[in-house]
Image: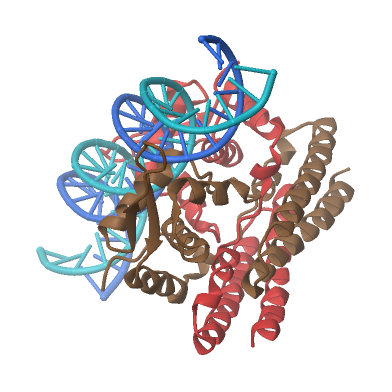
Chain colours: A brown, B red, C blue, D cyan
Amino acid sequence: MATPVTELEAITLGCVARTGPCTAYRVRQQFQRSPSARFSGSAGAIYPLLKRLEQRGLVRSRDVATGKRPASEYSITPAGRSALRAWLRAPMAPREVAVDDPLRTRMLFLDELPPAARRKWLDAAEEAVRAQEQLIADFAAGSPDAPGIDLANENARRLNRVRLRWLADARERLG
Amino acid sequence: MATPVTELEAITLGCVARTGPCTAYRVRQQFQRSPSARFSGSAGAIYPLLKRLEQRGLVRSRDVATGKRPASEYSITPAGRSALRAWLRAPMAPREVAVDDPLRTRMLFLDELPPAARRKWLDAAEEAVRAQEQLIADFAAGSPDAPGIDLANENARRLNRVRLRWLADARERLG
DNA sequence: CCGCTCATGTAACTGGTTACATGATTTA
DNA sequence: TAAATCATGTAACCAGTTACATGAGCGG
């Protein structure tokens, strides 16, 4: 059994699988369209990552020289698809499925702030969540129609709706 | 204005501030008690981090030699408290407040699996979320009573409840 | 032709993980 | 006293970010 792929590698594989043959640049664009900053899609991450995947035989590259500059177009291999499926199937430990909410982390220490600053924080947090909702809506609008993608977007929408209610409750409890 | 602290640094500062003077080991224990694997609290992360914070004047250390082994006990400085507050007050960009859900990420590519494996995934996911809920409950049971901590735990509970409903809907949509 | 954006990378830095070393304390 | 666990670290490795270099195409 080969080394399992990391989350970022899996998403990249998935992206190449979805989009079909594409350059590192296209992959980066996909990452950057996402409403989350988790995977920034910086060049320094993506280009080396695709090279690693190629060395492991999970993608293969074809040289496409538009004009004079060299460029590589990657496509997924059967081994790559299989690695992607293995990643999906891999059991997740309870701690690994934890939802990460940056606002929750801050809430833990919010009582370090004086009341006025606390209220200000809550206002800013609510605004940020609304902005995040907008990002999600925009992202969803540009997403291809597929049940998995739909459901993923729905997940993001619901989690944010809950956060807004939570923030409202927090305002009441702390205000 | 000094360099802002990272999230991990902030949590560490907050932990030292809360707990009062404590060793790196105590800080690690706090991290490891958390239901999330996000900050694993590995020694290789925490010990150097506290040293960095000390160099920046955000914590100060006192040598406590119980028995014969050297050890350092850290406490937060006024500058440290101020850095913690600055972290709390710092505006968050919309993309930075994104909720990260590992299950959502996988859902994006779930259609790569054959139907039977998909159902299996949904079962496993539901079980993992329930286990996660248990971890949260245990954590909450051992948490000190403070509004911020209460609210943070409530956030975790609610987000997971929503995920369970979402998984149920997904089962219907995909099954 | 100048500046802007698109596009393809690379290199240095940073911070976290893994794995290890070691000593002290508890438990069988 | 042997084994396990608590506790304090360190070092090598690895992946991601930041910042840069470079070239092509395009609009003014």
Residue B43 image point, x, y percent? 36, 46
Query: Residue B10: which quarter of the image?
Result: top right
Judge by depth and name the residue closer to the eye, B160 or D15: D15
Residue A115 image point, x, y percent? 83, 34
Judge by depth and name the residue closer to the eye, A88 or B112: B112
Residue A119 image point, x, y percent? 84, 37
Query: What residue appears at the point 74 percent right and 58 percent down from the top-left corner?
Result: A141
Query: What residue appears at the point 52 percent right and 25 percent down from the top-left corner?
Result: B58
Q: Is the N terminus of chain A in the top left, top right, bottom left or bottom right quadrant?
A: bottom left
Judge by depth and name the residue closer to the eye, B171 or B37: B171
Q: Is the C terminus of chain A in the top left, top right, bottom left or bottom right quadrant?
A: top right
Total labels: the figure holds: 0
Left or right: where B42 falls relative to A125? left
Q: Is residue A61 above or below residue B111?
A: above
Judge by depth and name the residue closer to the eye, B102 or A104: B102
Left or right: where B11 falls relative to D5? right
Does residue B56 appear anywhere in the picture? yes
Residue A113 image point, x, y percent? 75, 33
Q: Is residue D27 above or below residue A22?
A: above
Does residue A108 appear anywhere in the picture? no
Left or right: where A115 falls relative to C1? right
